Amino acid sequence: MADYNFADQYRAAGLAPGSDIIRLRQSAFDDLRENLNIDNILDLTRIYFGLTVPSGTDWFRNAFSENDLSFSMIDNEREAAVLAVCLLSASLSDGNINAGLVPIVTAINRHRSPVLQPNFLNEAFHRLDELSIKSEQGCCITVDKIETPKECQISTDIDDFEESPTDILKLAEIVRTAHEASSEASKTIVKQVTDVVYPLVERVDMLREEVSMLWWYIGGWSRKLNKPFADLDIGLAALMAGLDLAHLTQRKNGPIAARAILQRVFIDCRSKPKKEITLDSAIESLPDTLIGLLDFPEKLKSMEDLCPVSSAIVKYQVIGGNAAWHAQFKKSTALDPTILFTPIELSMQIYRESLLLSNID
């Protein structure tokens, strides 16, 4: 969808606006695409899934109504969703990781369906994998970029000045030329060193992340509970492993091997792991000793509908067990707390939610 065609997208949604309308939408679309921020991405995702937008959609409506006064958000859910998913797709193709991560998290393992264009979720998964691979490959680092500064070409001027040492204007010109040459040489060498050092720093950070994950993987030990994952209920292990791995992840998108790492850490160590678990059973397996230890950023309060597993954990910690938290969870997420997950999907869900919250916080 990165090379989307508005006419195709409208047709796929069962809409048939005229060519003039499409041109008007394109103009507003291009303006929005250049200025999307994270709050816009969150709103676009809600529009894409037909969820309520708490902050309102004035910024979205006004952008399109400026060129077409007939544009409205009332009884126009499908067209709004078309425009929203096109903006998300375009932003993702521009390298905006959150434009893919937010919809994937919001879909909560396909328990939510978008208004239209569900294939965008497949595109988002694929594009995020590509970005993960690209970040792991990094760029070619070579010290050959650092060159010896060129010799300052003022020797001739100095020779001339020696013949008339009382020429103050000539001396001033020599000093000015030397200063400019020195300043330019300094800027050049700083840029060359920076171009080499920054990629090295990124590579070191990535290696540090990989080493931390490797030791955690080898240990198979929950950092929060200080127990081996093999000894935990599989629902609890899924949550703790996802949170641990997110804490160890330094990049916005995380490694492409995240799923495989989680699979080996808490599932492959069991002889007969459960195939499916309910969300509420996993949440209610959290021990009382964890209360207060699982800190979520303040931003979660405005993203409970988008990060339902994190929201469920917070509500369980605040309200308590015995299904007391269910009603508040349903109210804030419009989801049933008994929805089913495979253990790995639950772990990946809390992992991605944690990455998203970390990206925004």
Image: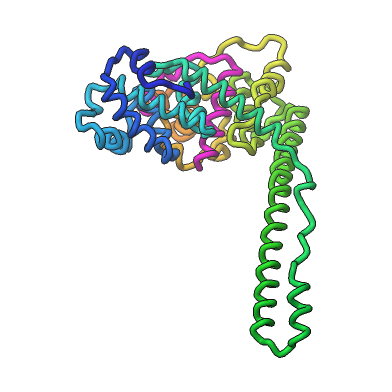
Rendered location of residue 237, percent (x, y): 63, 23
Is residue 94 covered in magenta? no
- Please report the bounds of the magenta region as a residue range: 332-361
Rendered location of residue 244, percent (x, y): 64, 32
> Is 164 placed above or below 43 here?
below
Rendered location of residue 207, percent (x, y): 75, 38
> Is 113 placed above or below 354 here?
above
Q: Is residue 110 left or right of residue 57?
A: right
Q: Residue at x 75, y 41 (%)?
A: 141
Q: Is residue 280 visible?
A: no
Q: Residue at x 23, y 28 (%)?
A: 72
Q: Is residue 26 left or right of residue 196?
A: left
Q: Is residue 140 left or right of residue 5?
A: right
Residue 29 placement: quadrant: top left
Q: Residue at x 74, y 87 (%)?
A: 164
Is residue 355 covered in magenta? yes
